[in-house]
Image (tube, rainbow, N blue to C red):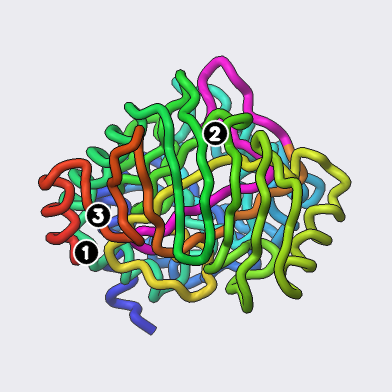
Amino acid sequence: MLEYEVLDACLKLLRDMFMLKPGETIAITTDTMSNEEIVEATAQAAVILGAKPLIFKIAAPEGAKAGDKDMPMKALIDGIKACDAWVEFNYKLIFYSTVYDKITEDPKNRPRYMNQNGVHPELLVRNIGKVDNILLNRFIQGFSDYCEAGRHMRFTTPAGTDLECDNEPGRDYVTADGFVYENDIKMFPGQISWSPNFESVNGVLVVDGTLSPPIGALQSPVKFTIEKGYIKKIEGGRDADNFRQWLESFDDPNMFLMAHSGLGFGPMAQLNGDIVEDERVWGCTEWGIGNVGPQLVSEMETGIAAASHSDGICLNCSLWIDGVQVLDEGKVVGPTEEFVELARQLGH
């Protein structure tokens, strides 16, 4: 299914986004729950480009640090670190695991990396194959720079979110702009991520899209009361009860930490219960809970370890940066007409 389009998207991924050169080695990681069609097409694309693919397939672990016990850690660390580039297609995360931390710990000596957890053919073709990455790069980098230069943020949504936080000086934004340069760590294109000052995160967060893991698409909204960066109360229906029990099952207070925030700007992204695509739905906000990876804090920090990680999606976000409104229920309204026009050209 979509075999021609998938190969074309994989060529675009490696040639235009990774800028993979002849003779370079690319690690392709996968597990027994991953989409094999994409893995094989990526390896084929590497060979077409004169590069050398190396596929690492493992039994699906629990994911993140909870999966450390299931992974052949030394073999993965040593093998992937020896490669020039790394694309992760694992359905269950190596990302946020100890394996990932060890591979990426030296910011000046690591394979350039893109996270593609759980990607399937339709998602890949829609969000990479059919997107103008150069135009997206212009918009998302500029918007990210404006957010990063600000100090105070306020988020609201029609579902009831009303949350405020501050940027933490020295913490860089992680912008999934579609290009992976030397030593880069990049997420799937179409998202801006950052970790705010944790104690500054206060208010009400209503997740009305996806909460994954462990739920996926929500049947009803889940309301979180946040105080100084930690979840103090979880309210709602069955989904809220299930999520509360999941967090409590780890017996780890850091699982209640608001780890990071994000803005979705995927021009073709659709809400379908798949967190990889859902957190890129245009105009959404994404809130990470639990483990804080070192790529989201400054070089003077090491991240905050937690047993696992979850992401919640809030739809149709309004956003103010230092009092200036830049999003109105998901529509770009600032900070300048240039951003509004770029969004229009991207279909929004």
CA distance separating discs 3 and 1:
8 Å
The secondary element bearing badge 1 is classed as loop
The secondary element bearing badge 3 is classed as strand
Is residue 286 magenta-colored?
A: yes
Residue carrying label 1: 348
Tell me which numbered mark, 3 or 1, is placed earlier along the sequence.
3
Residue carrying label 3: 332
Count residues near mark 3 (Cα–Cα under 10 Å), then give few for <14, some for 14-19, many for 20+. Answer: many
Q: How far across and down, in percent of the image, does residue 200 sit? A: 57, 31
CB under 8 Å between discs 3 and 1: yes
Residue carrying label 2: 81
Count residues near mark 2 (Cα–Cα under 10 Å), then give few for <14, some for 14-19, many for 20+. Answer: many
Tell me which numbered mark, 2 or 3, is placed earlier along the sequence.
2
Q: How far across and down, in percent of the image, does residue 230 sit? A: 70, 40
Mark 2 or mark 3, whichever is nearer to me: 3
The secondary element bearing badge 2 is classed as helix
Q: Nearer the viewer, residue 295 or 150?
A: 150
Q: Nearer the viewer, residue 256 or 166?
A: 166
Q: How far across and down, in percent of the image, does residue 38 sit? A: 44, 67
Find the magenta span and give its range: 280-305
Q: Amino acid at mark 3?
A: Val
Q: Amino acid at mark 1?
A: His
The relative height of residue 170 versus residue 77 in the rendered view (above or below) is above
Residue occupying the far top of the picture: 300
CA distance separating discs 2 and 1:
40 Å
Count residues near mark 1 (Cα–Cα under 10 Å), then give few for <14, some for 14-19, many for 20+. Answer: some
CB under 8 Å between discs 2 and 3: no
Q: Quadrant of residue 256?
A: top right
Q: Quadrant of the N terminus?
A: bottom left
Left or right: 264 with respect to 68? left
Q: How far across and down, in percent of the image, does residue 171 sit? A: 47, 25
